Amino acid sequence: MEAPPVTMMPVTGGTINMMEYLLQGSVLDHSLESLIHRLRGLCDNMEPETFLDHEMVFLLKGQQASPFVLRARRSMDRAGAPWHLRYLGQPEMGDKNRHALVRNCVDIATSENLTDFLMEMGFRMDHEFVAKGHLFRKGIMKIVVYKIFRILVPGNTDSTEALSLSYLVELSVVAPAGQDMVSDDMRNFAEQLKPLVHLEKIDPKRLM
Amino acid sequence: MQREEKQLEASLDALLNQVADLKNSLGSFIYKLENEYDRLTWPSVLDSFALLSGQLNTLNKVLKHEKTPLFRNQVIIPLVLSPDRDEDLMRQTEGRVPVFSHEVVPDHLRTKPDPEVEEQEKQLTTDAARIGADAAQKQIQSLNKMCSNLLEKISKEERESESGDTNALVAAVAFGKGLSNWRPSGSSGPGQPGQPGAGTILAGASGLQQVQMAGAPNQQQTMLSGVQMAQAGQPGKMPSGIKTNIKSASLHPYQRKSSPWLLKLGLIQVYRL
């Protein structure tokens, strides 16, 4: 008896488990220009893209100790763009040879009534911020350089204040689970950005 | 004698090869810069520089190699000087030295430095000899120590200032450190995990008050009023659908894995609406 052909197998799963590979670093304001120049040279040739996003982080506090976190992001400068909902799991520890932070990632585009929906589900907003910066791509790698602004009056995105005098630089790849050579490519790219910015694997739990 | 000669020849060959490679890569880099400057990309420039630095390194290694005899001990003497064109020489130098004559030889076979440089070197050597061996050694050591201290300070300073900022930014993005301090103290409901009962009642009461004050609840104004409205709604209405959803989400043992599912299904509904 041969195994039945793949097309006859019942479809059991839902989605492919996507993982986000992440490297982060920061650069002071006065070094931003040289970093942008180098990124324009190294990355795919396209019009420099800037973005202004408002991100809200929602928590669902269940009986377990650790709450469930969802991140909702909306674009403040692109009218009509869908809202973006993201779930990020705990970073996978253990493999010291892996050069990037790896965590489970689920990305969904939603309509504008996302916040109402989350509230009705029982989520409460924990914090929010505005991110303003530049976006670059190189193949499947995404490089974002952005400044985080603290929102002074909750809900009012006009009154913001910069959190620090630096820009956060993130190099990320969203890929199916198990493709560890992605982190090698990321590390090679990060080498080319030294000494302007040192991108490394930063464990958020260490900073709590 | 034979062995030394062979060694000399071998090392000369190696040196010639290295220098030829270096010259070629320099030439191609210059060509690239001059002719292809509009198509040039930063990685290709970085590659060229890396190549040049690698070749200089190997050149250094070849010179320092133990099998290389001291070139300093060799002397080059011109045997025949003639003002005629020498085809052989032309070929070997790729057309750059056509004639082995009285003008060419002093430049190419020069070993002494310029007179001013020679003066300065003599000055320096007499100064060095004057100090004496011990004092010289001490000075060398203190110089080394100062250099390493300075290097350490610079690298630490650079790392610290950047990594401090980096940590702050990463913490802000990861879990809102420094961002969520702006909630006014009146909202006890959303902030505290452990007191659902008392909290909701309180929030419910103040929420109702706010409704009377504000009139139509405006979600955009403050998230807080919305939150309090939702919580005031729950003990009042008890809609079974919403309650069972939340219950199943929190009581399910595999909360992490199933909740994205629930949300995805729920969200598809929202989108369709």
Image: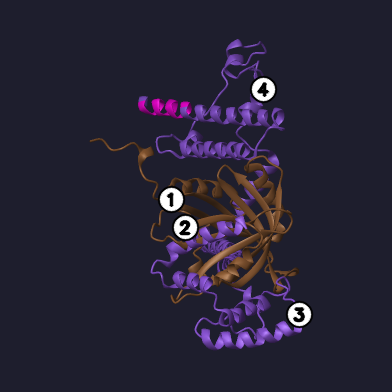
Q: Which three-letter amino acid code belongs to the residue tagged 4?
A: Val
Q: Which three-letter amino acid code belongs to the residue tagged 1?
A: Ala
Earlier in the chain: of badge 3 and badge 4, it is 4
- The location of residue A104, given as percent across then percent down, is 47, 57
Quarter of the image for the C terminus of chain B: give it.
bottom right
Residue occupied by mark 2:
A104
Are the residues tagged 2 and 1 within 8 Å (C-beta)?
yes
Q: Secondary structure at mark 4?
A: helix
Relative to B192, say whether A155 is above or below: above
* Colour of the chain lettered B: purple
Disc nearest the viewer among 3 and 2: 3
Q: Which three-letter amino acid code belongs to the residue tagged 3?
A: Gly
| Mark 2 surroundings: few (<14), some (14-19) or many (≥20) residues within 10 A | some
- At a point 69% along the width and 74% down the height, the residue shown is A154
Chain containing the residue with disc 3: B
Q: Is residue A35 magenta?
A: no
**What is the span of residues highlighted in magenta in the rendered image?**
B3-13
Residue occupied by mark 3:
B215
Quarter of the image for the N terminus of chain B: give it.
top left
Q: Which three-letter amino acid code belongs to the residue tagged 2?
A: Asn
Majority secondary structure in the magenta region: helix
| Mark 1 surroundings: few (<14), some (14-19) or many (≥20) residues within 10 A | some
Kindly indicate which chain is depicted in brown in the rendered structure: A
Residue occupied by mark 1:
A177
Residue occupied by mark 4:
B104
- At a point 55% along the width and 52% down the height, the residue shown is A172
Chain containing the residue with disc 1: A
Label 3 to label 2, Cα distance in Å? Answer: 43 Å
